[in-house]
Image: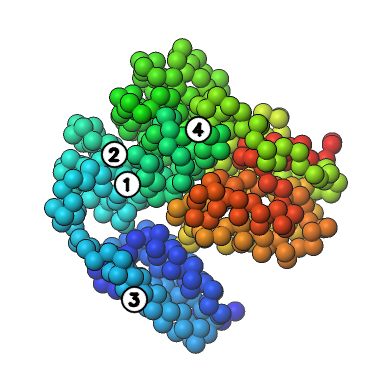
Amino acid sequence: MSEVVISEVRRDHYVDSVALMRLSQSLMKIEGVQEAALMMGTPANLALMDDARLLDETGRHAMGGDLVVGIRAATDEAASAALLEANNLLGRSQRNGQAEEAWRPKSLRAAVNGMPDANLALISVAGEFAAAEARKAIRRGLHAMIFSDNVSLEDEVAIKREAQESGVLAMGPDCGTAILNGVPLAFANVVRRGNIGIVGASGTGIQEVTCLIDHLDGGISHAIGVGGRDLSQDVGGISTLMALDLLDEDAATEHVVIISKPPPDDVATRILDRVSRSKKPATVCFIGSPPLTMPTNASQAFTLESAAELAVGRQVASLGLASELDFAKSGTGEVVQGLFSGGTLCAEAQVIFAEAGLPIRSNVLLPSLSDARSESKAHAMLDLGADEYTRGRPHPMIDPTVRSPVLREALQSSQTAVVLLDIVIGFGSAADPAGEVTSVLREVDERKRPIVIASVTGTDSDPQSRLAQISKLQAEGVQVARSNANAARLALEVLPDE
């Protein structure tokens, strides 16, 4: 197959990574375009683009502060059309931003001078610059939410120790979700206010629990993301402990929920010891952890669903959706193909299948589970947001077409009994993820395809509307569950008897 590769570099031209991912998605829709990406010219990004055959010699010489456009197309005409559209979109984005916001500070110092009452900085720059910007914020007395990834572990530890000494909170790096004083930040949902505080080392874990709490008529005081590595051995839970201190002193918070994958034993002990000294009851959900000895004021939840239930004091099972699904057991395939956009939702499904004694294979297998990759009948639980699926491409929550080829393959496989999906909506997510799923489903005769079970993480107040997404899925024969955990259990129920 012939291909044409062209690159363009805009010197010292920063654009937020989420905005660039959306622009890249638009270019992929142009006929004849095989691959396209707009990225900042960091060494890591240039390596990704080069691996994807998106760089010519011009692009390979970009610097960290440069914006790089890379296009691979079938013809010169298609490549030129895509480059023209990229420049049109970049110009339109810049004009829209100026129209919506006349004041655009060029530095953190200028922003602080313009907003002297601000107490938080959200940092979303290329990873190699994020640590420096976080330190600037901390030294000005600001809490820092670091959305950026690709920050070294050494820098993360240094940033969090400095924040701790300064009495401010460092959230992240790679902190994708927070709700502070009712304000959703990054990938978050519109949920009601209430008395439950969340501390989470997982973005989609926070989203699932906050949305389930909302469905159960509970509400959120604050949801504090700390970044996926905060409870690692090296970081030691610095931000988690500080967040627990803040929620302990917060009059609006009456119950605290902690969400993470299992930390090392000594870190878990440190967290539980802090919980034991709290004045408030807590729910601890270390996904994939064995039973732990809990403080007297705390309960252990083994799924995100049960974490929400314990916090509210009501069962998700009492909700009406998907209480009695109308489908027969599959009589064809033998395995479940779980295709997840949320890494913690993938982990939760692994826990449920492991509890049922079933073999599992995954690209992100929980450490507590034995690897069953050699078993042909092992059930697949794939995190499609992992590097091998998003290298050079947006995350599937931003671009749901990332999941489409894998979904198409699962639907057409004679081994597949059930396809298990998560649909995550809210701020930052794609405008219509259910629409992309249903467009792939329509390619396969419903009478010949496996059972498809999905859950929708979100609320009816989100921009995409949970109810609207559910309606689209149900119209195409998808069985929609109350929660991600409920979807996994339903998948177990309809597997053919051995």
Q: Where is residue 426 in the image (x, y as percent from the top left)?
A: 49, 51
Q: CA separation, marks 2 and 1?
A: 7 Å
In which quadrant of the rendered view does residue 251 lie?
A: top left
**Sequence-earlier tag: 2 or 1:** 1
Please tell me the numbered disc located at residue 170: 2
Read off the residue under disc 1: 146
Residue at x 62%, y 32% (from the top left corner): 316
Read off the residue under disc 4: 218
Within 10 Å of disc 3 (Cα), the crowding (few <14, some 14-19, many 20+) is few
Q: CA separation, marks 3 and 1?
A: 27 Å
Residue at x 67%, y 34% (from the top left corner): 353
Q: In which quarter of the image is the C terminus?
A: top right
Q: CA separation, marks 2 and 3?
A: 34 Å
Q: Where is residue 459 in the image (x, y as percent from the top left)?
A: 53, 46
Q: In the rendered view, does 483 fall on the left or right side of 325?
A: left
Q: From this viewpoint, is residue 349 visible? A: no
Read off the residue under disc 3: 91
Q: CA separation, marks 2 and 4?
A: 27 Å
Q: CA separation, marks 3 and 4?
A: 43 Å
Q: Which amino acid does label 4 sit on?
A: Gly
Q: Which of marks 3 and 4 is in front?
A: 4
